[in-house]
């Protein structure tokens, strides 16, 4: 079986390696660098920057732990150099995996000619035609930049340019208080940039639990980040000195730079979808069935290109499922337990449904919670802000969980498994959790759902 994959982000490269392991002859077409958005301008670089900011904060708070360290400063140029080195190493890692699994990498831009043929416009000007049995589209997404915002990549930027700045701007307006806006806003604030976040919804992280978003908001405000919610941008003027923004309530903001973090849209430019009859919805997502096959038999699509959450772990999982299905298996592409993570400080992580969603859907539910403040490990490491909240249905099955607090994104794995496997709070709460660890907060919240909490302190802490 011959398979051609267009795009080497997490969707494309995981599919390539899985298909090769299953015995297919695989060619990947990539017009840029392998690893895609996630590795080069997304998950990995943002988290590398945030890791540096974490070290900065820990260092500034060192005296509280009895460690004296008087000369802490952060140099963005060196932070970026560390990030670039890390990314370059990981890119090499994927190239090595391709080589060792016999995946052929063609550098250039891919275009569909028919249901079996991809034409590649190679970086050196050459053109190559690849004929295969099956094709996978994994070309990802690009930032949404409406024209009125005047994106120029210099004063009005997206996350892509923000991740390459070597000097922190004096001030920055962040349009969009979602995951990327909050992560990068807090990062630049910690490096000394005066940040204003403007969010249209009535809370930051608009799809997450209200109380969780409130905890993050409290921390952002503590760090002197100005957060404006339920407000839009009416007008943008890019001037020599910076950017002047008029808000929908008439308020005027000015800053050296403006970061657009209003979401991303599927990227299929140049693929010739219409030419081969592949259907897309009104937002440009390619339409796929349960098996991730498009409206054209033999052509599959995954990741940010389709209407599933724009997340690297979703793209990777879909890549693997598509590879298996292209090779004759019959796996379903949709999962109910998709973890959602925000790597701010405190971190935010959630899975399954939120309380608001349960109410909207008329689901009978119960909640249990536990504050990190009451947990010994949280006190030991000096990170006591936050809470775990767990939702169960009328049969005690865990249907959702939200965590705000230290290592929330790692802690979420256990609750993701519970939602995925349909475990009850009773069964999971019965598991012995090691002491002293942050994971005990999960156990305590589970005990709280069952009305058996020993360590919960009632009332607001
Ligand atoms: P992509 O990773 O976008 O890869 C698509 C690839 O296709 C690219 O390499 C592109 O060059 C190539 N391509 C496009 N068109 C063609 C063509 N015609 N021919 C050849 N090649 C082509 N997700 C998380 O889960 N966790 C996070 O912490 C996280 N942080 C993020 C932070 C930022 C700042 C951003 C922007 C995104 C973040 N994401 C995160 C989202 C994540 O990066 C994406 O969901 C993921 O990369 C999607 O994978 P993909 O394979 O669908 O597409």
Image (cartoon, grey):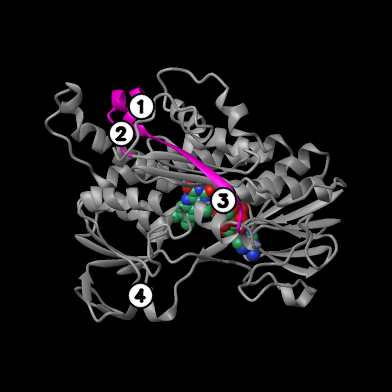
Measuring from the top left, give residue 422's x and y in whole percent: 67, 38
Callouts 2 and 3 close, C-beta under 8 Å: no
Report which residue position mark 4 lands on. Answer: 232
Q: Does residue 305 sit above or below 389 in this rendering? A: below
Look at discs 4 and 2 and give the one toward the viewer: 2
Task: Measure the C-alpha gap from mark 1 to mark 4.
Answer: 40 Å
Mark found first going from the N terminus, 1 or 4: 4
Residue 353: which numbered mark, if any?
3
Look at discs 1 and 4 and give the one toward the viewer: 1
Boundaries of the magenta span: 362-385
Q: State the residue in front, 460 or 20.
A: 460
Q: Does residue 112 sit above or below 318 in this rendering? A: below
**90 to the left or right of 81:** right
Report which residue position mark 1 lands on. Answer: 375
Q: State the residue in front, 305 or 343.
A: 343
Mark found first going from the N terminus, 4 or 2: 4
Q: Quadrant of the C terminus?
A: top left
Res. 124 in view: no
Report which residue position mark 2 lands on. Answer: 384
Callouts 1 and 3 close, C-beta under 8 Å: no
Task: Measure the C-alpha gap from mark 4 to mark 3.
Answer: 27 Å
Give SS at disc 4: loop
For the point 69% across and 67% down, the residue is: 286
Task: Measure the C-alpha gap from mark 2 to mark 3.
Answer: 25 Å
């Amino acid at each position: 079986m011959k398979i051609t994959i267009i795009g080497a982000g997490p969707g494309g490269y995981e599919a390539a390696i899985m298909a090769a392991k299953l015995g297919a002859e695989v060619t990947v077409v990539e017009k840029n660098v392998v690893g895609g958005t996630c590795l080069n301008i997304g998950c990995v670089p943002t988290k590398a920057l945030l890791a540096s900011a974490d070290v900065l904060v820990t260092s500034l708070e060192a005296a509280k732990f009895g460690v004296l360290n008087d000369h802490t400063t952060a140099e963005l140029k060196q932070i970026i150099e560390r990030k670039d080195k890390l990314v370059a190493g990981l890119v090499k890692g994927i190239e090595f995996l391709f080589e060792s699994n016999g995946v052929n990498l063609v550098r250039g831009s891919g275009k569909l000619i028919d249901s079996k043929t991809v034409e590649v416009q190679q970086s050196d000007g050459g053109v190559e035609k690849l004929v295969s049995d099956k094709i996978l589209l994994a070309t990802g997404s690009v930032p949404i930049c409406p024209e009125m915002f005047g994106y120029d990549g210099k004063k009005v930027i997206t996350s892509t340019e923000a991740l390459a700045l070597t000097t922190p701007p004096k001030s920055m307006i962040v349009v969009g208080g979602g995951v990327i806006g909050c992560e990068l806003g807090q990062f630049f604030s910690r490096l000394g940039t005066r940040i204003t976040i403007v969010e249209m919804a009535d809370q930051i992280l608009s799809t997450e639990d209200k109380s969780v978003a409130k905890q993050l908001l409290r921390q952002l405000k503590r760090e002197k980040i100005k957060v404006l919610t339920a407000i839009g941008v009416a007008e943008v003027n890019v001037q020599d000195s910076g950017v002047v923004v008029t808000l929908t309530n008439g308020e005027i903001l000015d800053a050296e730079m403006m970061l657009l973090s209003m979401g991303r849209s599927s990227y299929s430019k140049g693929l010739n979808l219409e030419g081969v009859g592949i259907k897309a919805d009104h937002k440009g997502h390619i339409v796929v069935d349960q098996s991730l096959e498009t409206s054209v038999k033999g052509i599959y699509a995954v990741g940010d290109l389709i209407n599933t959450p724009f997340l690297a772990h979703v793209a990777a999982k879909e890549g693997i499922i598509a590879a298996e299905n292209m090779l004759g298996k019959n796996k379903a592409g949709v999962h109910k337990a998709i973890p959602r993570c925000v790597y701010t400080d405190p971190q935010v992580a959630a899975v399954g449904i939120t309380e608001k969603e349960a109410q909207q859907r008329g689901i009978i539910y119960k909640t249990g919670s536990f504050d990190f403040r009451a947990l010994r490990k949280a006190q030991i490491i000096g990170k006591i802000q936050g809470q775990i909240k767990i939702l169960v249905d009328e049969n005690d099955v865990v249907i959702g969980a939200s965590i705000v607090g230290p290592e929330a994104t790692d802690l979420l794995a256990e609750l993701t498994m519970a939602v995925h496997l349909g475990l009850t709070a009773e069964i999971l709460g019965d598991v012995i959790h090691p002491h002293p660890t942050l994971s005990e907060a999960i156990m305590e919240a589970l005990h709280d759902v069952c009305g058996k909490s020993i360590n919960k302190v009632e009332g607001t802490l």
